[in-house]
Image: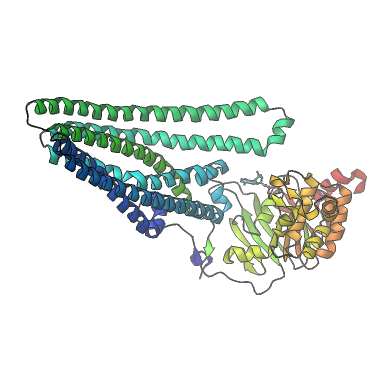
Amino acid sequence: MGLKRRMDLRRMGSPGDEVDPIFAFLKKYIPKYWKLFCLAVACLTVEAICDLLQPTIMARIIDHGVATRRLDSVLRLGGLMLTVTALGAAAAVGRNILSSRVSQRFGTELRSDLFRQIQSLSLENLNRFETGSLVTRLTNDVTQVQNLVNGLMRIFVKAPLVCVGSIAMATLLNPHLALIFIVVVPVIGSLMFLNVRIGYPFFRKVQRMIDGLNSVIREYLSGVRVVKAFNRFEYETERFDRANRELAGVTTAATRVMAFFTPGITLTVNLGIIAVLWLGGLRVSGGQMPVGQVMAFVNYLIQILGSLMTISFVFNMLVRARASGERIGAVMAERNTMAVPERPLRPTEGGGRVEFDRVAFAYHRDGGEPVLREISFGAAPGETVGIIGSTGSGKSSLVGLIPRFYDVTAGAVRVDGVDVREMAPEQLRERIAMVPQQNVLFSGTILENIRWGKPDASAAEVEAAARAAQAHEFIAAMPEGYQTVLGQGGINLSGGQKQRIAIARALVKRPSLLILDDSTSAVDMATEARIRAAMKQYVRGMTCFLISQRIVSVMSADRIIVLDNGVVAGMGSHEQLLESCPVYQDIYRSQLGKEAV
Ligand SMILES: Nc1ncnc2c1ncn2[C@@H]1O[C@H](COP(=O)(O)OP(=O)(O)OP(=O)(O)O)[C@@H](O)[C@H]1O
């Protein structure tokens, strides 16, 4: 069976799904929460019925108790009113507890599902989203959807119930006066429809603007040293102000549009109340209607107004949540560009053998310039392979293919005899440790950072790795030693210290395959020589890939690959390359002086 046929793209939702694929991710949560959701709605219904009964009971108190001066009726109906109110309050407490529980659990689960989905995506997938935008989707967008779920359970279902119920009760009370609704209801319905139609595009824009603002902040904070060094505060402030102004502009426009509708609804209902008072007044003077009924009618109209306000408020939430749901759905529906084998192969050997077989690679599959071409070589278990070449020649891209950060566009990369595309990514990466060119440390103690490579590493193992990376000495000299807390990204360490901790983190894993991508560029030559000497013992038996710009760093490797503009310009030992490879000779000359060759 061919490799392609055995692959299975991991997808969210199957191709035959009928639900809008963007919102398909919500399907998962319905079976989980519908029972609690319905219970909350049941509480809401009780609450709504209690609210609806009150104006009618009040009308009875006025017409049958106050107007006829019958205290017993006032007390009896007053008691009934209190009971109904108490029941409504109890239902409200239950509904509040349920709605908070469901919306919090749903929000937490959605956020963590989204986080997992982001983690599962390939670098190629992730490159399609701005980091700032992913942060907004994980935080603000999830909150918007969560607010809607909460809103639906707290008020939204009650509001239509109260609205329809009030119309029904008022019609039962006095069908003539209820004709006013024939005018009021369609006007309000149209206003609410327009509210959603016009508001939606604005809120999509608002979320995009929040993305933009987040990206500017993230970029500024991660590059704050450069900004200071170049004194570019004004430029950065202007960039921030622009993003901030754009966000404020769109938000103001959105709220301005929304601001027109809510008073419009209030005005319509108030005109209805005036009509009720006027027409009701005429009927009362004509003796066709008791005063209590007019009061009840006005109360029902006020309840209708309240519920319509709630509905339009939740519609605003719905509009925002729809825009946010779409953005979350876009990440959830992202199909992993990295095919995962249905039945992964497990290599029988475990020494860290690597083979590149006529490999070509481009970052953009569809017509992009290849950054690597016709790369073929093998690294035997325990061999140290140095990779050297000018900047941009493809060194990092080449080693990135081993842990399968990206897939080759032609040829194959094999680890321990198996094509990396046929292995389970976790099993492949289990045998590899990497120190990337751009150092990444996490907030936490130094010990935690080193143990990141092997969570169950003993203190002795951590120390051995730190010694091999020439990090033990400076760590031990710190007052808190291995318990020293690092700021975000290891801010309280020097560049060279950070690199050495990153090396220790990789070493402690004791992988069969170690990749060091220019990982000693920030340490001085003498320290680097000490690291090389100390590591020699430590990495015995591991296959090592050593990328460096410095010839002295790779000179002692068993084999050196010289990359030039994406192709192998030479391969062999230092001596062989000095003999035969002009590119290597050039690098050697430029770094160690003309007379050296
Ligand atoms: N994520 C990416 N997307 C698109 N192109 C990329 C990406 N990363 C690198 N490239 C391009 O690939 C080419 C090789 O880059 P690579 O980082 O592999 O070179 P390198 O030899 O490691 O360079 P250096 O020594 O400066 O780190 C460059 O032309 C670069 O512009």
x and y percent of residue 174 in the render? 12, 37
- What residue do we see at 61% from left, 71% from top? 346
Q: Give the left or right position of residue 97, taking residue 350 as reference.
A: left
Between 51 and 314, the residue placed more toward the observer is 51
Q: Give the left or right position of residue 333, taking residue 362 as reference.
A: left
- What residue do we see at 42% from left, 44% from top? 147
Query: Measured along the vertical axis of the image, is residue 349 above or below residue 286?
Result: below
Q: Could you say which quadrant of the image residue 286 lies in?
A: top left
Between 403 and 578, the residue placed more toward the observer is 403
Query: Measured along the vertical axis of the image, is residue 328 above or below residue 120?
Result: above
Q: Could you say which quadrant of the image residue 187 lies in?
A: top left
The answer to whether residue 15 shows anywhere in this view is: yes
x and y percent of residue 500 in the render? 79, 52
The answer to whether residue 182 shows anywhere in this view is: no
Between 394 and 157, the residue placed more toward the observer is 157
Query: Measured along the vertical axis of the image, is residue 425 above or below residue 99?
Result: below
Q: Residue furthest bottom?
A: 348
Give the total of numbered labels.
Answer: 0
Between 242 and 295, the residue placed more toward the observer is 295
x and y percent of residue 226 in the render? 71, 34
Q: Give the left or right position of residue 377, taking residue 1 as reference.
A: right
Q: Give the left or right position of residue 86, taking residue 15 as reference.
A: left
Query: Measured along the vertical axis of the image, is residue 291 above or below residue 500?
Result: above
x and y percent of residue 269 in the render? 24, 30
Q: Could you say which quadrant of the image residue 506 lies in?
A: bottom right
